[in-house]
Image (cartoon, rainbow, N blue to C red):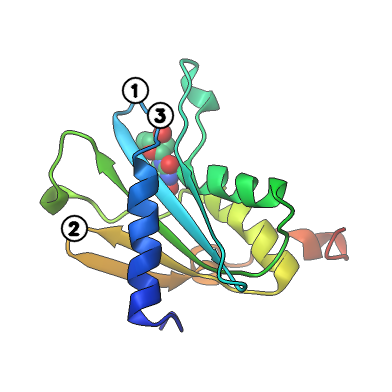
Amino acid sequence: MSGLDPAARDALIAAAKAAEGNAYAPYSRFHVGAALLFDDGAVVTGANVENASYGLSLCAETVAMAAAAAAGRRGGLVAVAVTGGAIDTSEAERPTISPCGRCRQVLNEFATLGGTDPVVLCAGAGEVVEIRLSALLPMAFGPASFGTLGG
Ligand code: THU
């Protein structure tokens, strides 16, 4: 269980969906939105930002996490919602999206700093899979691997 009440869960997924509207994804035509919920109630969103040099593209979760970090946040990450799909497919055809490996690592950095294990809400057509970040990224390499929680 997420520990989030249904209204908070739905609101976070709605925030991720809204963020999809800002995706810049002319190459994949796959729009992704991410919403991060912090323990003070703040929600920080992101969308994928692609590049003509494809490998430089940034995922929605990484964009959201970087925005939160750049605003001074370090810990307190309690939940993440991710939504998305190809722009020419209907809601009913949407796959269930989960964060890519790189994004799991990026999320882990700041979750670890705050000592949280955020629930990740992976939304797709008619379903939401809830899974802890630690289950998505077991035995993670992170700040503790340096013998310190960083600064
Ligand atoms: N993408 C994300 O933004 N988040 C994910 O978790 C998976 C993939 C983006 C990257 C690329 O812009 C597009 O989706 C297709 O892979």
Q: Is residue 133 above or below residue 48?
A: below
Label 1 to label 3: alpha-carbon separation? 6 Å
User: Judging from the image, what secondary structure is the residue with disc 2 in?
Assistant: loop
Relative depth, front residue between 97 and 3: 3
Which is more N-terminal, label 2 or label 1?
A: 1
Q: Amino acid at mark 2?
A: Ala
Q: Which residue bears the numbered disc 3?
A: 24
Q: Residue at coordinates 88% horizontally, 65% vertically from top-left?
A: 147
Amino acid residing under circle 1: Pro
Q: What residue did someone put label 1 on?
A: 26
**Residue drawn 53% across the image and 67% down it:** 133
Pick the front one: 35 or 147: 35
Residue 80 position, x and y percent, is 48, 62
Based on the displayed image, in which of its 4 quarters is residue 8 positioned?
bottom left
For the residues labelled 1 and 3, say whether their Cβ atoms are less than 8 Å apart: yes
Residue that label 2 marks: 125
Q: Secondary structure at mark 3?
A: loop
Q: Amino acid at mark 3?
A: Tyr
On screen, residue 147 versus residue 71, left or right, reads: right
Give me the residue at 46% from left, 84% from top. Answer: 3
Mark 2 surroundings within 10 Å by alpha-carbon count, few (fewer than 14), some (14 through 19), many (20 or more): some
How far across and how far down the image is residue 130, in percent? 38, 72
SS class of the residue under badge 1?
loop
